[in-house]
Image: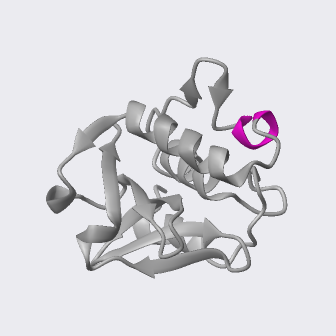
Amino acid sequence: MKKTFSEIIDEYHGQPFKAAGNGNGGFGCIDLCHHIITKGLGKEMPSGMDELTIENYAEVLKGDLTLERERLAEIIKKIGIEIDINRILPGDLLLIRTSKGGVLSAIYIGKGQAITSSAGIGVCVLDIDDNNWIETARRFD
């Protein structure tokens, strides 16, 4: 029996944060998004560009958080189909600016909310009613 989108999201909510985590003990933000899109929704999502991929970006960049955020943004902006932020749908990948100047990836779940994984919090749901926080939105077929 195929799961609903809500059931898929419920599976991940509350799991711990783990940088570059793939579900074994937690998830990083992009890892969570990749997992939900490919395993939960069954959609194709390329894992990266050139030598840098979703699976290895934290290891390749060796903990340089500024560089990691910049490269994460580069990866996300080059995959999927760009969507107008006013036309996002549940399942779309978002790049969200944080109040501290960083970025994180999230999956839009509807009703002005997105799911992500954040250090110190883990997998959580964010209110993003104000689209000013969204830097880009991407969709996968």
Point out the stretch of residues depicted in magenta: 56-60
The mark tally for this picture is: 0
Considering the image in quadrants, where does the C terminus appear? top left
Vertically, is 39 above or below 96?
A: above
Vertically, is 112 above or below 109?
A: below
Do we see residue 30 in this rendering? yes
Is residue 57 on the magenta stretch? yes
Q: Nearer the viewer, residue 118 or 71?
A: 71
- Percent across and percent down for residue 95 are 42, 55
Q: Main secondary structure of the magenta part?
A: helix
Q: Nearer the viewer, residue 108 or 52?
A: 52
By what rule are the colours in the image chosen? Answer: one colour
Q: Residue at x 83, y 56 (%)?
A: 24
Vertically, is 92 above or below 43?
A: below
Do we see residue 79 in this rendering? no
Q: Residue at x 64, y 70 (%)?
A: 118
Answer with the quarter of the image where residue 12 lies: bottom right
- Percent across and percent down for residue 8 are 51, 64
Q: Residue at x 34, y 76 (%)?
A: 128
Would residue 96 appear left or right of 62 to someone viewing this image?
left
Is residue 81 on the magenta stretch? no
- Percent across and percent down for residue 93 are 40, 51
Q: Residue at x 44, y 38 (%)?
A: 43
Vertically, is 123 above or below 54?
A: below
